[in-house]
Amino acid sequence: VLVLPALIVRFCRGPEAAPAPAPTATGPWVRLLVDPDGTVLRLELEEYVRGVVAAEMPAAFELEALKAQAVIARTYAVRRMRALGGAGVPGYPEADVRTALDRGGQAWLSREELLHRWGPIQFHLHWARIEEAVAATRGLIVTFGGLPIDPVYHSTCGGRTENSEDVWQEALPYLRSVTCTTCRHSPHAERTTRTLDVEEIVARLGGEPGLRATAAGRPLIQVVQTTATGRARTVQVGDRRFRAADFRLLLGLPSTNFRVELAGSQVRFTLTGYGHAVGLCQYGADGMARQGRSYEEILRHYYSGVDITPLDAF
Ligand SMILES: [Zn+2]
């Protein structure tokens, strides 16, 4: 929980005890835990945001989509920065944010890593667009009721995003299910299938005997509850029940938008979409930008009832 008004005042005064910043560096500063090696980098917030946009969204996406991602990346960091009253990385008092996605982090790549990944020509082209997107939204974050939101996003919803409580526990007023007609160009919008062996599924779910215990006439694996958008909400395996969001991650499935069929010792999942489907749909954002919509319109579409707020306006 943040105490923003007080901390923004501190933020405006600049960083305390900043060790000899470069002449052009003004902060605020974010302390980034680089997984898995454990190095902590101290970066200007705007430089951190550039490395996140580069890592989290294809650089060829429309500029307005890149701007929306920049505002999201900044909001994510501001919510966690200890200098602004955030909780930082649990267990790491010296870090505000981290790069490991499976530990609540946000991907980030350095300029050197991007140069290596893209090569010099692509780096030159992509980095210029990312710098433009970040500069055009400098200092802007997404707020609800005056506080930075939890700006969750995913790759491809496949037609409709999810209510937060249908995927996780908490019902957040700005994470409501909305229609998304603009992610059809995503490579993940097509229906795909994944086939897994029953034994592999049982092992990945923990291997307990109850996972094989079925009553007569009941299939070994079935979706027993769906969300308002038709995605799996609860999956029963043997006599055990799983939240579909957990089940998906344990099995490495791209989404919870699946049907399941059993054929002997094989289980076939028919799926669409990629990601948890809560918050902003990245391909949908790109599609909205292709239709001429602005980053503000994109953010307001996927996050209900929010404001786009400059940090120094608190
Ligand atoms: Zn979508």
Image (spheres, rainbow, N blue to C red):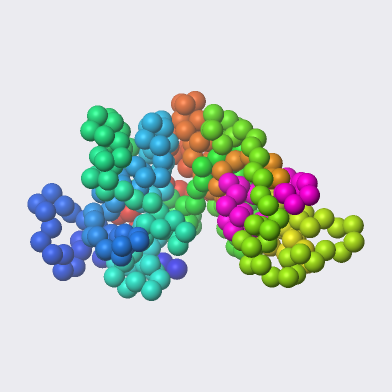
Q: Is residue 210 visible?
A: yes
| Residue 70, image quadrant | top left
Left or right for 248, reference 11: right
The quarter of the rendered structure image containing the C terminus is: bottom left
Q: Residue furthest right?
A: 216
Q: Position of residue 208 (x, y in %)?
A: 69, 70
Left or right for 66, reference 187: left
Observer-nearest residue: 189 or 310?
189
Name above or below for residue 151 compared with residue 237.
above
Observer-nearest residue: 44 or 105?
105
Q: Going 37% across and 67% down the picture, which residue do you hit?
A: 88
Name above or below for residue 4 compared with residue 63.
below
Magenta segment includes 258: yes
How many labels, in total? 0
Q: Which residues are magenta?
A: 244-267
Magenta segment includes 252: yes
Q: Position of residue 141 (x, y in %)?
A: 38, 50
Q: Position of residue 158 (x, y in %)?
A: 61, 38
